[in-house]
Image: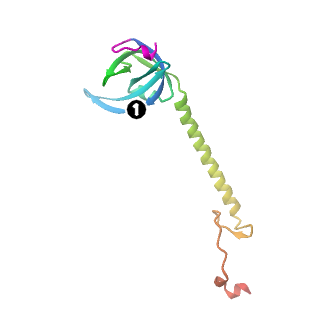
Amino acid sequence: MKISELQLRQGNVDVTAEVVEKGDIREFDKFGRKGRVCTVKIKDGSGEVALTLWNEDIDKVNVGDEIHLTNGYVGEWQGEPQLTTGRLGKIEVLEQTKGEQKKEEKLDKKVKNKNLEKKKTETKKEIFSNKEYSGREYDAEGAEQEEPSPSNVDEEEVM
């Protein structure tokens, strides 16, 4: 079924779409039971629609994922159609594409950059720990030390 074919109060909705936006997660307490709710925007080749995620479904769905909604229901929220799993529906993540992969790639890149910086710092410390490099004095961190000026030199040191 295509998103463009959805009608208000339609049940038994079966749709495959990509998650393009994920809203804030809200917590609620209804009849003494706590829960979480989040609205995502999904799209296919025919259009886009809001989808309400409940509790554990929130954690398994991310932007960029391709999902399959089975036995969903089209309700209405603030005058707009909105899909939900309802009591009998099910959301399956078919492909954790762009969203999760990008997060993992960014994390890998951060770790690699951090390791590279650490290596550079260690190499720099090793080079400059000699105390003398290219005729100049350096401390262990690689900062150049000031050479004593003639006014600071004792006469005994000169002779």
Q: Is residue 19 magenta?
A: no
Q: Please tell me in which quadrant of the rendered image residue 144 appears.
A: bottom right
Q: Where residue 40 sits in the image (x, y, percent)?
A: 41, 27
Q: Nearer the viewer, residue 28 or 80?
A: 80
Q: Where residue 92 sits in the image (x, y, percent)?
A: 47, 20
| The C terminus - image quarter | bottom right
Looking at the image, residue 159 lies above or below residue 25: below
Q: Where residue 61 sits in the image (x, y, percent)?
A: 46, 27
Residue at 51 percent across and 28 percent down: it is 64
User: Helix or strand or loop: what does disc 1 sit on?
Assistant: loop
Q: Is residue 2 magenta?
A: yes
Residue at 30 percent across and 25 percent down: it is 78
Q: Nearer the viewer, residue 140 or 93?
A: 93
Q: Nearer the viewer, residue 24 or 44?
A: 44
Q: Please tell me in which quadrant of the rendered image residue 71 appears.
A: top left
Residue that carries the numbered disc 1 in the rendered image: 23
Disc 1 residue type (three-letter)? Gly
Looking at the image, residue 63 lies above or below residue 82: below
Instruction: Characterize the local packing of mark 1: few (<14), some (14-19) or many (20 or more) Cα atoms within 10 angstroms.
Output: few
Residue at 69 percent across and 88 percent down: it is 155
Name the side, left or right, on which 108 lies relative to 51.
right
Q: Which residues are magenta?
A: 1-11
